[in-house]
């Protein structure tokens, strides 16, 4: 059996300590938004036909994973490398309720990278962009899956791909 590649980690005991995360910022914002279409189906809504708040978070993650895939980072391959990118911070503002049957675009873009922190912005808008349902921001951090610790740096292939969009 082949041995898994080792990923560098910090010596900290918990991912809850944000001061332990490296902060060498790659300062730029992607100019274009990745667009991921969604439609509110019955299982996304409450009994009144209003989209449940957790559904928006699911759509945000789906959009982020598909955006990474479109850049050449398949999340399954990242996991095979022993790296995970969990959410460590999330801020969401609900502007308007989305209802059963309505279609929307989940728009996401990477804002910046600071060490192993990756910040993303989101908008969920009606297809004609007249109605804004949600805006938000998510921060991810790279974790060594085997050790459960924050990595010192992103795997080189991942960092190279992300650097290209800046």
Image (cartoon, helix red, strand yellow):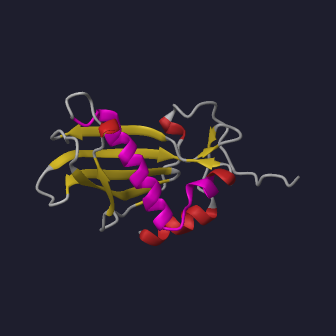
> How far across and down, in percent of the image, does residue 35 sit?
32, 61
Residue 25 seen from this side: no
Residue 68 painted magenta? yes
The total of numbered circles placed on residues is 0
Instruction: Look at the picture and state if 74 lies above or below 133.
Output: below
The residue under the point 59% across, 56% down is: 154
The residue under the point 23% across, 53% down is: 103
Q: Which of 90 and 66 is in front in this view?
A: 66
Instruction: Look at the picture and state if 19 lies above or below 81.
Output: above
- The boundaries of the magenta stretch are 50-78
Apparent side of residue 8 relative to residue 128 in the rendered image (left or right): right
Apparent side of residue 64 relative to residue 32 in the rendered image (left or right): right
> How far across and down, in percent of the image, does residue 52 sit?
29, 33
Q: Which of 71 and 26 is in front in this view?
A: 71
> How far across and down, in percent of the image, does residue 114 sit?
46, 53
Q: Which of 154 and 45 is in front in this view?
A: 45
The residue under the point 36% across, 41% down is: 57
**Quadrant of the image occupied by residue 27:** bottom left
> How far across and down, in percent of the image, does residue 16 sit?
51, 31
Quadrant of the image for the C terminus?
A: bottom left
Q: In the image as oriented, which residue stretches furthest toward the bottom?
A: 164
Residue 11 seen from this side: yes
Q: Which of 145 and 118 is in front in this view?
A: 145
Apparent side of residue 110 relative to residue 52 in the rendered image (left or right): right
Q: Main secondary structure of the magenta part?
A: helix
Q: In the image as oriented, which residue stretches furthest toward the top?
A: 47
Residue 58 painted magenta? yes
**Quadrant of the image occupied by residue 49:** top left
Q: In the image as oriented, which residue stretches furthest toward the right?
A: 1
The residue under the point 11% across, 56% down is: 130
């Amino acid at each position: 059996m082949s041995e898994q590649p080792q990923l560098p980690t910090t010596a900290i005991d918990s991912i809850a300590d944000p001061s332990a995360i490296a902060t060498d910022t790659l300062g730029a914002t992607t100019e274009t938004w990745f667009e991921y279409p969604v439609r509110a189906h019955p299982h996304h809504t409450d009994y009144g036909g209003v989209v449940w708040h957790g559904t928006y978070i699911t759509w945000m993650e789906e959009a982020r994973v598909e955006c990474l895939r479109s850049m050449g980072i398949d999340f399954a391959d990242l996991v095979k490398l022993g790296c995970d990118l969990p959410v460590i911070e999330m801020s969401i503002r609900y502007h308007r309720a989305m209802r059963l049957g309505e279609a929307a675009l989940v728009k996401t873009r990477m804002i910046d990278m600071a060490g192993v922190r990756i910040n993303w912005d989101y908008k969920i808008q009606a297809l004609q962009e007249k109605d804004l349902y949600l805006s938000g921001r998510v921060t991810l951090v790279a974790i060594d899956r085997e050790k459960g610790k924050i990595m010192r740096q992103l795997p080189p292939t991942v960092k190279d791909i992300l650097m290209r969009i800046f």
